[in-house]
Amino acid sequence: MPRGVYPGNKGKKLTQATKDKMSASRRGREPSEETRIKMSKTNRETWRRKIAAGYVSPLKGRKMNKASV
């Protein structure tokens, strides 16, 4: 089996305590400027592809007021 292709922990059941620790370790971190630029670029490309494929928002044409939000 090639290295790095099949992670050894795939399908492993984690306890809720472990999940909480993992969540807490990431909390408060902000993405670097480089990462923010990459995310922005990816989001723009995704929306361009959606719009080109004929995507229409389910909210298009609906009035939004403060009571419905």
Image (cartoon, rainbow, N blue to C red):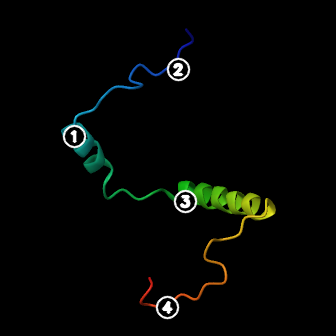
Query: Within 10 angstroms of label 1, few (less than 14), some, or many (20 or more) residues?
Result: few
Query: Percent position (x, y) of residue 39?
Result: 58, 57
| Figure label count | 4
Disc on res. 4: 2
Q: Distance between the Cα atoms at labels 4 and 3?
A: 31 Å
Q: Are marks 3 and 1 in contact (CB under 8 Å)?
A: no
Q: Which residue is painted at 45% across and 85% down in the image? A: 68
Q: Position of residue 3 (x, y in %)?
A: 53, 14
In whole angstroms, how far apart are the C-alphas of marks 2 and 4?
A: 51 Å
Which tag, 3 or 1, sits closer to the chain's start? 1
* Residue at mark 1: 16
Q: CA distance from mark 2 to mark 3?
A: 27 Å
Q: Nearer the viewer, mark 2 or mark 4?
A: 4
For the C terminus, give its image quadrant.
Answer: bottom left
Marker disc for residue 36 = 3
Viewer-proximal residue among 63 and 21 = 63
- Amino acid type assigned to the residue bearing label 1 in the image: Gln
Image quarter hosting the N terminus:
top right
Q: Residue at x 19, y 40 (%)?
A: 17
Query: Which element type, helix, strand or loop, lies under badge 1?
Result: helix
